Amino acid sequence: MIENVLENNSVTFDVSELERLSPEPKGPGIKFEEWRVLNKEEVLSHSDAFNLGITIQTRVGQALFPDNIEEIEDDVEENGWNYRLPQPAVSRLDTPLIGPDGKPKYWAVRDGNNRFELKFNEFCCAVISGDEYDLLRYGCMANNPDSWSKKKDSTEEDVKAMIRRGFDMGKIEKTEDAVMNELMENYPKVRSRSRPRFVAEILNSVGQTVAFQPFNKTSIAEHMSTHFNVDFMGQDTDNGVYRVSKGWGRPAENERNAINLLELIMEHPELQVQCISHLSVGNGVTEEPNEYNAVALREKHDVYVNSFLRKMAVIVDNWRTGTLKLPSMHWVAQVNSKEKPNQFQ
């Protein structure tokens, strides 16, 4: 056991090591004040705040993780406090509060819930300042994904909640550009592969729509159920069709989709294959779809699919005898300002 971990559950912190090795906390609207070692009895924790009905950090679900706490304690006892990691952060309360334990609280934990819950009596932390929204956002941003600090990352729901709080506090406009900028600048690793769809989800959650609707297989299924009363994809013998959902726009995706359509029309010659199509958005698309180019892109992919199938050598004989049924393409509405969700395009 490291010498500075004592029997009375206290640990001796070296503020000079904090100053020398610890990265100063940074965030929009956040000012780093100083390094401190505080008595935890004077600090309002996430759990204390929750019991008092006060929000000091943004966690939609679980905020404390016993496995992480145990892992951090074991690491401290074996290796000492790691000053090179980003440290917990607190802000000074404008007005001291009486905590659930009946003792006055002068500080509020803004990041580092799990480290606050360690068995030690002292709390090694950075003191930061800023307005309430910036302090709340700091806690969410500080938990962006990384691979080395033994903490729990912010979830998608945490980020959604923080942005909605930004709407409520007048800090973020309810527009696509504003939400996209917020995600790219402050949460760059959260849903980075499907950011346009994430923007749509956030705006939809507050009753707003986007100019161009992004889809995936799950949301396509919901769309078909809501607007076409179709509750399942796949083989529908009663109606003589085989429905399949496909996204178009990425070269590898296009080829894979076309091959799969070929397989389906060969496997089910008695059925009409219906390809419920949407234009993909985000990383890898050859041209980002929008409300202006959607029609042209749809036509381009229709031509691609039919051309691909006609050129496949394995279907030449079927094509010549007229036994091959090409799939019918059904494009869902994505341009919200011009297209009706209960009609294919």
Image (cartoon, rainbow, N blue to C red):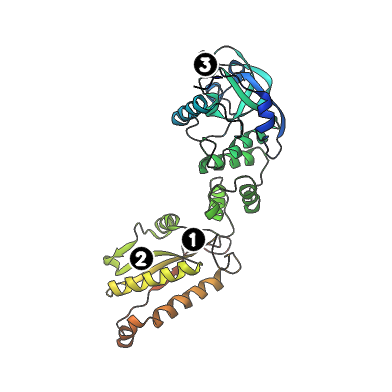
Does label 2 or label 1 sit earlier along the sequence? 2
Q: Position of residue 285 (x, y in %)?
A: 54, 65
- Cα separation between marks 2 and 1: 18 Å
Q: Position of residue 122 (x, y in %)?
A: 59, 19
State which quadrant residue 89 falls in. top right
Which numbered tag is attached to residue 9?
3
- Which residue was labeled with disc 2? 243
Q: Nearer the viewer, residue 116 or 276?
A: 116
Which numbered tag is attached to residue 88?
none
Up/down of 78 relative to 200, above or below: above
Give the secondary structure at mark 2: strand
Up/down of 321 relative to 89, above or below: below
**Which kind of residue does numbered mark 2 sit on?**
Arg
Q: Is residue 59 visible?
A: yes
Disc nearest the viewer among 3 and 1: 3
Does label 3 or label 1 sit earlier along the sequence? 3
Determine crowd level at label 1: few under 14, some 14-19, many 20+ residues with C-alpha closer than 10 A.
some
- Which residue was labeled with disc 1? 341
**Which kind of residue does numbered mark 3 sit on?**
Asn
Give the secondary structure at mark 1: loop
Residue in the picture at 60% in, 39% down: 141
**Which kind of residue does numbered mark 1 sit on?**
Pro
